[in-house]
Amino acid sequence: MKKERIIANEETINILINNAKKTIADSECLLHDTELIKVEICNNKLQGSYLQLVLELLSGSLLGICEVCSNLKDMLSSSNTYVKRYHMQMINLSQYEWCIYLGGKDQNGVLAILIHYLNEQHYNSLELKSVLEKVRQLGMKCNVGLRSMTAHYDEPNIMYKKLLALNDEDVYVRRISEQLLIHDMILKYVSPILQMIKEGLNHIDKEDIRKSSFEFNIQDILNAKVAEAFNNKEELDIMISHQIANAWNDIESMKRLFDTCEKIIEYLKSRQIDYNKLIEMRSLVEMQLAVSFMRHDLICSMDSYLNAQSNTERSICFMYVYRIETAALTHLYGYNEERRQNSIWNRIKTIPEYKSTPLSNDIERNLKILTSHFDGTRRNLYTHYREGSKLNISDRWHCANKMDHPKELMQILQLVTLCKNIHQYLASLLSVMNTTEKKKNDEILEPIRSIKEIAYKNNLQDIVKMSGTIYLIV
């Protein structure tokens, strides 16, 4: 007999949200201190040492916890289907990268390296082996296909199907609980070492630390002031809520239209009837669907920015934005000639009315400008906790602290405006296509009208009836 599912009440959900907020704050504080110590280790040329590996283990675990807890609180705070699915995606991606960072399938994970180091020195590694086994178990629960789609996007039709399958947030809450248990095991292992570090690093130049902190704080103050200004504008919250309210319904509506095009194309193909116009229509709907995914994901990121509790958390939101931008625009337009040949935009350009539609060149120019500035190194840094043997945590942390939030907000505005302009452009292109088709039909029908008028004047009823039937068919 199937066990009845227990729905969490509002009080329980609020406790989970508040716990997530506290975990983020505590983790950020410890991560800040850990990164300062890592700088000191680097200055003392202790790279590759056991101490550095332990700190890499700690900082990677902390950053992963910050990210998933940020998504957890936003997922639980919302009742919107699209928003929940957005955060499930982000949790899945972050957990996958976390597991690759710690363990990984290539044995280059920090835990695997630490265990190998201890074994070579004939020290006990059982505690870390237990942690590694838990990490691998969690990694097996991550959806690799969903992770790839979140990081790279996919054909809109495939994206819809994968998102539709995200219908149980409890799965992700339980997975975060497992991650937190693993994190506690790591903290337990690291704690005595941290105590030794604290006692042994009293010689650190406090002036250097103050300078380093001051550099971060200048940007922090500017970013915090901007965030405060946004949070004081209730109309922005209302606008974002309005924009995202019917997001999933809009997606489903376009998906039904896409499926209708597919069915009609198959039918016409089976009857050996020309279906080129339907191919063109399908490309329009596909473009519309892809742009909608991009726009809704950007709005979800902006919503997370408004709900963030710290500058680091806000910076993480902007890292998501850059991933969304590069992934979506790669499918829409492409960042090099090969990618452009396979893009949705390239299919739009084959529509005869493309050249005669206003704004075609403007839209393409904007797409070209945006994609020409893609930074592969930055995109990979914002996606991967590690790339092979290269560990990205410290670089991600410093990027988060130095990030210029007003600049990032302007980029979101530019991207959302692009989405709006593309929607308007596609409507304009469809209108031109309809006008062309009507003109074409009118040219075909003109001789039939003339025949019908002559037949009517001469009372030739059979010809009147026949011409009327042809008129209806065309």
Image (tube, rainbow, N blue to C red):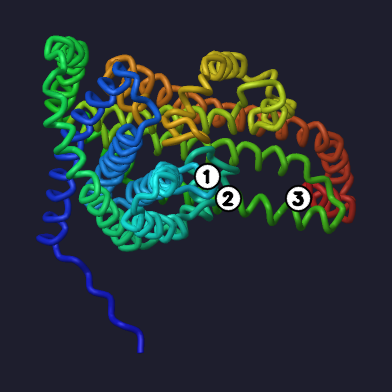
Name the mark nearer the viewer: 3 or 2: 2
Q: Earlier in the sequence, mark 3 or mark 2?
A: 2
Residue 41: mark in rendering: none
| Residue 425 shows up from this direction | yes
Kind of residue indicated by mark 3: Leu
Q: Could you give the CA–CA distance between mark 3 and mark 2, rounded to whole angstroms?
A: 38 Å
Residue in view at x 54 percent, y 13 percent: 369
Q: Are marks 2 and 1 in contact (CB under 8 Å)?
A: yes
Q: Quadrant of residue 222?
A: top left
Residue in view at x 67 percent, y 30 percent: 348
Q: Which residue has dot 3 on it?
A: 472
Q: Secondary structure at mark 1?
A: helix
Q: Earlier in the sequence, mark 2 or mark 1?
A: 1
Foreground residue among 350 and 297 = 297
Q: Earlier in the sequence, mark 3 or mark 1?
A: 1
Residue 149: mark in rendering: 1
Foreground residue among 269 and 241 = 241
Name the mark nearer the viewer: 3 or 1: 1
> Label 2 crowding class (10 Å Cα cut-off): few <14, some 14-19, many 20+?
few
Would you place residue 399 above or below residue 279 in this image?
above
Q: Could you give the CA–CA distance between mark 2 and mark 1, rounded to whole angstroms?
A: 9 Å
| Residue 250 shows up from this direction | no
> Label 3 crowding class (10 Å Cα cut-off): few <14, some 14-19, many 20+?
few
On the rendered structure, is 101 left or right of 184? right
Residue in view at x 61 percent, y 22 percent: 335
Q: Secondary structure at mark 2?
A: helix
Q: Which residue has dot 2 on it?
A: 158
- Where residue 190 sits in the image (x, y, percent)? 23, 44
